[in-house]
Amino acid sequence: MNGAESLVKTFLANGVDTVFANPGTSEMHFVAALDAHPEMRCILCLFEGGASGAADAYFRMSGKVAGTLLHLAPGFGNAYANLHNARKAPSGIVNVVGDHATHHLRYESPLKGDVVGVSQAVSHWTRVSPDAESVARDGADAIRVARSGNGQIATLILPANTAWEAASHVAQSAAPHTLDRPSEAEIAAAAKALRSPGAALMIGGAALHGDLRQLAGRIAAKTGARLMGDTLVARQSRGAGVAMLDQLPYPVAPKIESLKGTQTLILVGTHRPVAFFAYPGKPSRPEPAGCRIDPLCAPEMDIAYTLQALADACGVDAHVQPKVYPLDLPDLPTGDLTLEKVGQAIAALLPENAIICNESITSGFTVMPPSLTARPHDVIGGTGGSIGLCLPAATGAAAACPDRKVLALTGDGSAMYTLQSLWTMAREQQDVTVVVFANRGYQILRDELANVGVNSYGQNARAMFDVHSPELDWVALAKGNGVPGQRVTQAEAFVDALRDGFATSGPSLIEVAC
Amino acid sequence: MNGAESLVKTFLANGVDTVFANPGTSEMHFVAALDAHPEMRCILCLFEGGASGAADAYFRMSGKVAGTLLHLAPGFGNAYANLHNARKAPSGIVNVVGDHATHHLRYESPLKGDVVGVSQAVSHWTRVSPDAESVARDGADAIRVARSGNGQIATLILPANTAWEAASHVAQSAAPHTLDRPSEAEIAAAAKALRSPGAALMIGGAALHGDLRQLAGRIAAKTGARLMGDTLVARQSRGAGVAMLDQLPYPVAPKIESLKGTQTLILVGTHRPVAFFAYPGKPSRPEPAGCRIDPLCAPEMDIAYTLQALADACGVDAHVQPKVYPLDLPDLPTGDLTLEKVGQAIAALLPENAIICNESITSGFTVMPPSLTARPHDVIGGTGGSIGLCLPAATGAAAACPDRKVLALTGDGSAMYTLQSLWTMAREQQDVTVVVFANRGYQILRDELANVGVNSYGQNARAMFDVHSPELDWVALAKGNGVPGQRVTQAEAFVDALRDGFATSGPSLIEVAC
């Protein structure tokens, strides 16, 4: 057994059985080791940003840590942007990065680079294995770290000789680090505050979906506090029967408006709200002056314990039911397609238990609201503000949940960042329907330029905001990646395409021109 | 004037008039400033790796520093891989990275990240502007750094408030730092060594192209030393009339073979040769035991001075002529297309003064040799071993040299990394002919797995090496980006497509299936 095989066996022995991979020439022993263990699932991504985004969504939907296989510093660089999103989720990922053999690093070879430096700029934990005998232990430690704190980025750098030299053992990962919990006094104080006028409970992480979401809704129902969520969240339950929640809008003015009257904000699993960016003369903190912020349970603390303890302290019993979204499916739209009609069609047709990967950004302001009362589903979306998450996330969600329908909603500018993931959907025959909103530009930049006071602009701004001359042809881009696609301009055609996408297995793409 | 405008004016005042851009929501004041100065050329790339690769090639072909405009830490991450290649070239680039306003950085906003950390992992110089008044001076310093040492990566991070607050001046960049030179004694010793048996002169950087390349050839002719180049070089003159040179092959065994008998290796503008990777039981240093290495002039030193001083010390006068490649154009090939025939067709048709951007990797072993005797041209290629350079580099070369034909030769695996640059070629109507070698996989990985002793492999290795099921359709991918393309299987069709590509302006793509 060599070091590489000791790592593959350690992964499998600890339940890490999926790797999103872009190996390069320095990871050949690792590839050979994976090849000897077909029980390890290897998914090829054609670009490392596809691998990191997939591993992120895989964790969000399954709670399981996946591996990525990256190639030296540049490979890690390519994965960086979606690791940034994963860090903000937070999601647990183990990155395995091949590096030069220890004795080769003294030379100025082409691929020599600062792997440790680029890793530390986004990982929670970075370690370089010193020798083959250490690889199994280091791999088990990386898994432990990735599973701790509700999900962390662990990066294990393997000099090539640690992969090819002899190793003697497989290692067991220790249990994740114990999650910090608020004290009983803090719980009691928060429970009391929730009953006060202008109180709001803002939840994040695991509190946003499944049973915990409903529990949060019951706390709100019992105390009269307002249940809220931040603008960008990793995953949430949504649709009929789900506990209602007010999500903070993205633009700063409505964000401030939304928090008006809030006197106490109790945070469980989320950071205090903040403006996405600073703007001249506008505040970074959106809450009103004098609003008390209670950071009861940080995102890396024990969210399930905190919510249950809070419910108990508030006297939430079996009779307390949350206020939930009703089932209210719109009629199927007809005529010229608009974003409103796209939203209606999605709301009407979305299958129960579907997963929406949402990076529709400006289009989403209009498209998303109708599905609040659709059949129950999950939504995963951007967390770190770095575009290019949607298509990789769809591949990761589909890998995690092969029995669920995935709907990917993406702007054209975002989709272009990581369109290689379309190929992975086709290779893996994933059940993903992709909707690309072809507004031919970075609409959010047009909006943001207006936000800084520029309302008319010239050739250089247009050159950087507009994605036409030529127009991207998403049907062709999909075809190039092996995914069937069509462009629609009529509501009936969109309805048919969406229905087909949900009805058939395998990926498809719909380019929405409106 | 605000800080952003003071930077744009400083760029223009110092001759930096081209920016490869992927701005985000934090760079709006910079966009507004660029918009007010249409004499600044802004080229949109749809992905930051396209911007950094273009800026690299722009410098290689023009000697001029271009700017990039990147969006916080994730945007820099996307640019990282091609900045790695640029650092190895070396090329001078000024990266402008927007960050949150200074007063906003204390909050956990989604896009908060370690911009300084990720920058320092690849830049020679990183600075955060503290206030708007400092931006012009910092920008001028960045330009100076980028122009020093024969080209360096300078990264200027601009918190948003430094862009929008008032600034009063424009700054002048100081001259680049003086280049170190070898001593007269070192020159004299090297000149003597060049006449000794088994002597070789290995050149890099500016010595590989133009007049300096010919001067190096004259030194070799005068002294009897062998003229050599390393495996990966940023740019070189090539074709008829160019001084002949032996370039080190990529695989380690022929690399070692190529250096057999070398007793002294004098380095001008290049590092000592090294195996691309370490392999079990094979040396990192390819030169024979006892070979003396003379690092006369490092890549960041004064290459032109050194070569001229060496020529003078060797007594190279006007009568000494280099051994040059003859003009020897092959016949146009016919019949089923092979890589040999692709190479012949390129050699026969390549226009004088064309620029080849070469990332053909394994296909290149066969495709490139025939054009050694083609009409004179330049070749730029991979320097840091990070794939995905070719298409961005083609856009940068075309921007630098609009009157020259550009031929981009790329493997399918490499092209997929940064295919967004096809769109930039179409948007800018660049005169680029792209040839994609569709071998349906990472051929170099198949070779490297064999190098580590694995000759038959199973499902997981195949899953990571083979890019079929589905096959990428490059004609569709080109169409999706607004570039006309065709797939050819016959030599006659390839000849026609290549001839058309060179004859017409604007981009086109040829998918080679062989």
Image (cartoon, coloured by chain):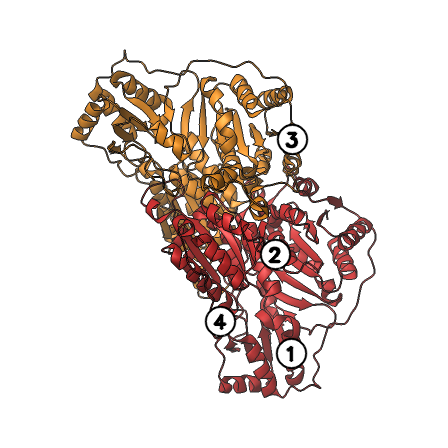
Chain colours: A red, B orange
Query: Disc 4, disc 3: CB below 8 Å?
Result: no
CA gap, disc 4 to disc 3? 56 Å
Task: Say what secondary structure mark 1 lies in.
Answer: helix
Q: Residue A160: tell me if it is visible.
A: yes
Camera-near label (1 vs 2) is 2
Which quadrant of the view contains residue A315?
A: bottom right
Camera-near label (4 vs 1) is 4
Name the chain letter of the residue that bears numbered label 4. A
Give me the disc on residue A215: 1
Q: Name the residue carrying label 4.
A: A175
**Is A252 or B407 nearer to us in this picture?**
B407
Give neighbour class at mark 3: few <14, some 14-19, many 20+ (Cα, 10 Å): some
Disc 2 marks which amino acid? Gly
Asked whether the residues under marks 1 and 2 belong to the same chain, the reply is yes
Q: Name the residue carrying label 3.
A: B484
Q: Residue B92: tell me if it is visible.
A: no
CA gap, disc 2 to disc 3? 33 Å
Q: Residue at x 27, y 32 (%)?
A: B302
The residue furthest top is B319
Q: Residue at x 33, y 16 (%)?
A: B322
Name the chain letter of the residue that bears numbered label 2. A
Asked whether the residues under marks 2 and 3 belong to the same chain, the reply is no
Among numbered discs 4 and 2, the one appearing first in the sequence: 4
